[in-house]
Image: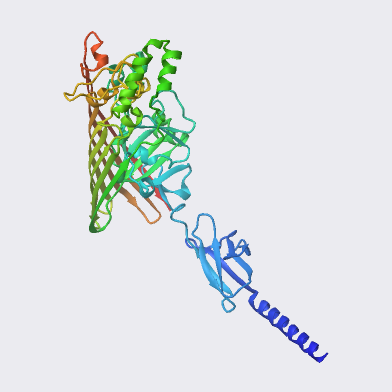
Amino acid sequence: MMKNYQKSGVTLLLLLLAMGYSLAQNYSVSGTVKDSRTGDGMAGVNVVVKGTSQGTITNINGAFTLNVPTSPATLQVSFIGYRTAEVQVSTSVTNVNVVLEEDVTSLEEVVISGLATTVKRTNLANAVVSVDGKELMGTTNPQTLDYALYGKMTGVNMNSNSGAPGGGVNVNFRGITTLGAGASQPLYIIDGVYMNNSAIRNGRSEANQAGAGSNTSNQDDAANRLADLNPDDVERVEVLKGPSAAAIYGTRANAGVVIITTKKGKQGKTKVSFSQDLGFAKAQNLNFYEPWNEDKVVYYQTEYLGNVAAIPAEVAALNQAIAEGRNLDLEKEMYGETAFLTNTQINVTGGNEKTSFFVSGGLQDEDGIIKHTGFKRYSIRANIDHTVSDRIKLGINTNYVKTDNQRGFTGNQNNTGGSLGYAIAYTRSYRNLKPDANGNYPDNPDFNDNPFAIRDLAENNQFINRFITAGNLSIGILQKPNYDLKFILNGGVDYMGANTKVYMPEILQHQRALPNPGDVIYGNQNDLNSNIQGFLVFNAT
């Protein structure tokens, strides 16, 4: 009996100790939360014990009281637009004062609104989509700037015009949809210069009769000239949509505005950076072209052509091709190249309290997955900013770009040869189409041209020389403690010189069938855009 009593006493003692421990740990913490800018208390701030669901919110004066279950503990203090703060509390630290700072990655972020000055996102009246340089480039190096933007902007629909190297992407803001290539392209502005992003007609659709009348220009398979810009030089991209864009830039901005800001120099020691990217490209999601067999030959000759008599000869040709190892998957033969990709970039940046500079050079060389196609871009840029005095600042951004684009023939065609995809679709896999020892290409009995001859002998090239120069000048007219008045002048020029060549040799099968065999179209286009604008900007605190 005594033994049982002693056990009960021990149990009661343990319960009392546990309760005492629990009471000792469950303590009250109070404090205030203030704004770092104004020093005022912040109402509605969330205060939570980290790792638990136990929390509270501050009152109108920024004060709070919270029961905390453990010692020590961490309080998480958070509010929309501000950085989350963490403070340590314990039974010996039960009163805390927390100061929250604005989140510089969101509301404190400075964005370009399309006017003469930048605006903090907290004061921005319109929705602006922003993409910074790091997010733009990501972990892989995009071929062109429009491809770099792909999938990074909400409310923007982007569709590739072509799979050719140097591509071309049609950009439409949601709600702006129009049939016809380029009809609803946004206005592009780079460092204040209104940029020409028109696709260059090269006459390809006339050489291979891809269309007729007014439709031919839409089937040239051309690239937008945003491809001339080096994505490595871009610091930030802002997108203005809807009425806010049209209110600033007028009717030309009905389809939206894309504002591109390139990198600037930073005060400090001169820094040199060099990068070299190497890669490979392979075709994905091929259409699974199926090489022919005897059953397919018999079925096709019987059901589609109604020419049973030709079956023995076709089967013999098939067996000979199999024996010689040339019953080919024509799709892989045409689109199965392993493309080698290189991108070389060198940047030099630095400056002092008066002058800062950013100088870059880039070379991008990308082969296509089809032989004799590719894209090369040579780029040189110099951005210089100089402070003349306390009141006068000026800057100049200049960029020279040269691109060489071999696009090949992969688009639509109707009446004649001139498209690799069309020729392959109608060609049997066992046809002997490769050139002989003398370089002569056999005729294609299944279609009006030999796709290997088109690939190796025909040309569809674009050569671009481009200068984009932007300048800006800021003059302080009035500078007072609570307000200032500035005159800002900016603008620039965009010159593009384009030379194109489309060449169909007279020895091609479909050309020999024409009254005048051989087709060559040379194109030359020179565009000069310039703009200048002045603003009086009044800032008050």
Asked where in the image residue 416 lies, by quadrant, the reply is top left
The colour scheme used to paint the residues is rainbow
Q: Nearer the viewer, residue 284 or 181?
A: 284
Rendering coords of residue 275 (x, y %)? 26, 51
Q: Is residue 365 left or right of residue 301?
A: left
Rendering coords of residue 54 (x, y %)? 63, 64
Residue 354 in view, yes or no:
no
Q: Is residue 368 left or right of residue 84?
A: left
Q: Nearer the viewer, residue 141 or 427?
A: 427
Q: Please tell me whether residue 105 is drawn above or below residue 508 in the rendered image.
A: below
Image quarter where the N terminus lies is bottom right
The residue located at (46%, 14%) in the rendering is: 303
Q: Nearer the viewer, residue 173 or 44?
A: 173
The residue located at (26%, 34%) in the rendering is: 374
Residue 10 in view, yes or no:
yes
Rendering coords of residue 186 (x, y %)? 39, 32
Q: Please tell me whether residue 127 is drawn above or below residue 292 in the rendered image.
A: below
Outermost residue, top side: 515
The residue located at (46%, 56%) in the rendering is: 103
Q: Is residue 249 left or right of residue 204?
A: right
Q: Nearer the viewer, residue 387 or 539?
A: 387
